Image (cartoon, rainbow, N blue to C red):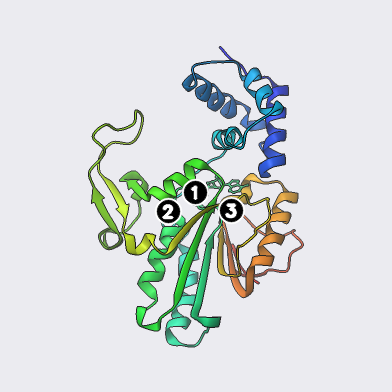
Amino acid sequence: MSTLTESTYKRIADIAKRRWGLALGDRKIQLVANRLASHLRKQGGGEIEDYVQRLERNPSEEDMLVLFDILSTNVTSFFRDPAHFAFLERELYAPLARGTLAVPGRRLRLWSAACSTGAEPYSLAMQALELLPPALGFDLRIVATDLSNKALDGCRAATYNEMQLTGLSPERRARFFVKIDPPKDPVKGSPTGPLWRVKDEVRKLVEVRRQNLVEDYNGLGPFDVVFLRNVMIYFDRDTRHEVVKRMYGVVRTGGILAVGSAETLSGLDVPFRPAAASIYLR
Ligand SMILES: C[S@@+](CC[C@H](N)C(=O)[O-])C[C@H]1O[C@@H](n2cnc3c(N)ncnc32)[C@H](O)[C@@H]1O
């Protein structure tokens, strides 16, 4: 059986840090070993050491994205951290609807900056549809980015099983999803049972793109709202600082940045102002 030695693990951790800012830490060695072993089994076998040498020598971009998927975590859910959505309702949508807040050109831009399989950007889109009367004529777009192939494929498919919809109210399910028949020949290991697809009126508000958070944000911004949630926990302090500095460059003055409920900007030298728990204003 293929094993992962500590020194090979360190070489993988180096790649992850350099390319994606991921700080794997010592405690993940077993998890990474299991995931690599399972990946190699699916590829027909092979030694972890040979695989890592190949990645170090001359990797294609696709090889690297496969490794990223092996190392990263895509856990997400609809309307995760409801306090963030309550904040948007109170501080953005209610004043916009009342006319006590204006955005230039009635143009509203939101960014789900580590969108995973789509629950976050589609939640943002559903909330906007619920709270922004169409008669007000806002030009609304939600940009959904991630680096992971698995995440981007899931986000584009916008199709979820019962478990992934846990916590979504029956009203939202009825208004924003259509039930579809499960595939006749499901891929082995994929979830069985009914599937639900996000309706077109929601999907058409969301533009899905690949973006590595530690590379330049070319063509992105300015944004009224950025959700950068549950991704900085995977970064070390320097990477968090670098990413939040870049965010400062793409959030408009007065715009909102939400981070995960276990994340904070405190200790990072970037002038976002705290507005509520894990929410900041530029
Ligand atoms: C735990 S999920 C969070 C999803 C969602 N924001 C939420 O809070 O439910 C973390 C996501 O960050 C993405 N990610 C990690 N490092 C990244 C990087 N350097 N660039 C872009 N996305 C990254 C992963 O692919 C994964 O989909």
The image's mark for residue 116 is 1
| Above or below: residue 153 compared with residue 123 | above
User: Badge 1: few (under 14), some or many (20 or more) residues near its Cα, within 10 Å?
Assistant: many
Residue 152 shows in this picture? yes
| Quarter where residue 246 is shown | bottom right
Image coordinates of residue 60 in percent, x first then y, are 62, 33
Q: Is residue 194 left or right of residue 106?
A: left
Per the image, label 2 sits on a secondary structure element best described as: helix
Distance (Cα) linking label 2 and label 3? 19 Å
**Ligand 1 lies under 8 Å from the Cβ of mark 2:** yes
**Image quadrant occupied by the C terminus:** bottom right
Q: Are marks 1 and 2 in contact (CB under 8 Å)?
A: yes
Q: Nearer the viewer, mark 2 or mark 3?
A: 2
- Which residue does the image show at 44% across and 61% down from the upper left? 206
**Image quadrant occupied by the N terminus:** top right
Image coordinates of residue 130 in percent, x first then y, are 35, 71
The three-letter amino acid code for the residue at tag 2 is Ala
Q: Is residue 49 left or right of residue 135?
A: right
Image coordinates of residue 4 in percent, x first then y, are 64, 20
Residue 89 shows in this picture? no
**Ligand 1 lies under 8 Å from the Cβ of mark 1:** yes
The three-letter amino acid code for the residue at tag 1 is Ser
Q: Are marks 3 and 1 in contact (CB under 8 Å)?
A: no
Image coordinates of residue 95 in percent, x first then y, are 47, 82
Q: Which residue is mark 2?
A: 119
The three-letter amino acid code for the residue at tag 3 is Ala
User: Badge 2: few (under 14), some or many (20 or more) residues near its Cα, within 10 Å?
Assistant: many
Q: Nearer the viewer, residue 16 or 219?
A: 219
The image's mark for residue 262 is 3
Mark nearer the N terminus (2 vs 3)? 2
